[in-house]
Amino acid sequence: MTSLEFRTQVARPSQVERDRALDVLREGVGNGQLSHDTFIRRMELVLTARSRAELATVVADLQTYGRFQRAVLRGVAKVSAFQVRLRRTWETEQLPGLRLPGPGAARVVIGRQTGADLRLGDASVSRVHAELRPAADGWVLQDLGSSNGTFVNGLRVVGAVSVRAGDQVRFGRLGFQLIVE
């Protein structure tokens, strides 16, 4: 009597299975479960996996969401985004106004120094922090090498930038909303 030998072959994952695993990894990055570097390393593992078990191991610790859970997460994200917009609106309304000089005015030096045209007595403001100067179509704000930066509408000023009424400006920690009258 002869013994029968059964040779088993490990089934290699199909491209569809690899794509599903990559989708789970992408969702993990989107949900904040994976960093970019971890995503790259795991993506390489998915692309070189020799078996379905290896694929399962790569995505085993990532939680996948069903349709209902995704809908709830989208709802929570919308509520969070609304809260952020509401907070920004509230903070904007609470900013003190900084009146731009009228036509024909000269440049305005902003800083902590005694001779500054607009003197701000806060430690986050440099002695000579920034400069406002008239331009053909309004005003130009230029950072003068300040330590804590000059910002317009949340973006740091590098060099000079045009500003107009309604813009939010910040010198160090002090914020203002530009107004013209």
Image (cartoon, grey):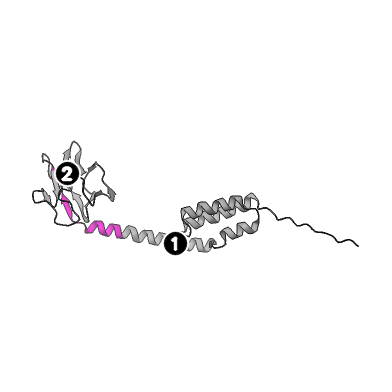
Which quadrant of the rendered structure holds the N terminus?
Answer: bottom right
Residue 140 image point, x, y percent: 20, 41
Task: Find numbered disc 2 in the image and state the secondary structure of the residue it sits on.
Answer: strand
> Which residue appears at 47% of the width and 63% of the height?
72
Q: CA distance from mark 2 to mark 1?
A: 44 Å
Q: Is residue 181 visible?
A: no
**x and y percent of residue 163 in the render?**
22, 44
Q: Nearer the viewer, residue 1 or 46?
A: 1
Number of the front mark, 2 or 1: 2
Image x and y of residue 181, in percent = 14, 47
Residue, disc 2: 132
What kind of residue is marked 2? Leu
Q: Is residue 106 part of the magenta span, yes or no? A: yes
Q: Which residues are magenta?
A: 87-107
Secondary-structure class at tag 1: helix
Residue furthest right as drawn? 1
Disc marking residue 156: none
133 relative position to 14: left or right:
left
Nearer-the-camera pick, 173 or 71: 173
Amino acid carrying mark 1 in the image: Gly
- The answer to whether 75 is drawn above or below residue 15 in the figure is below
For this orientation, the residue located farthest to the left is 115
Picture layout, residue 71 above or below residue 135: below
Residue at image position (16%, 41%) is: 133
Residue 99 lies, in percent from the top left, at 15, 49
Tell me which residue sits at (59%, 60%) in the image.
Answer: 57
Which residue in the structure is indicated by mark 1? 75
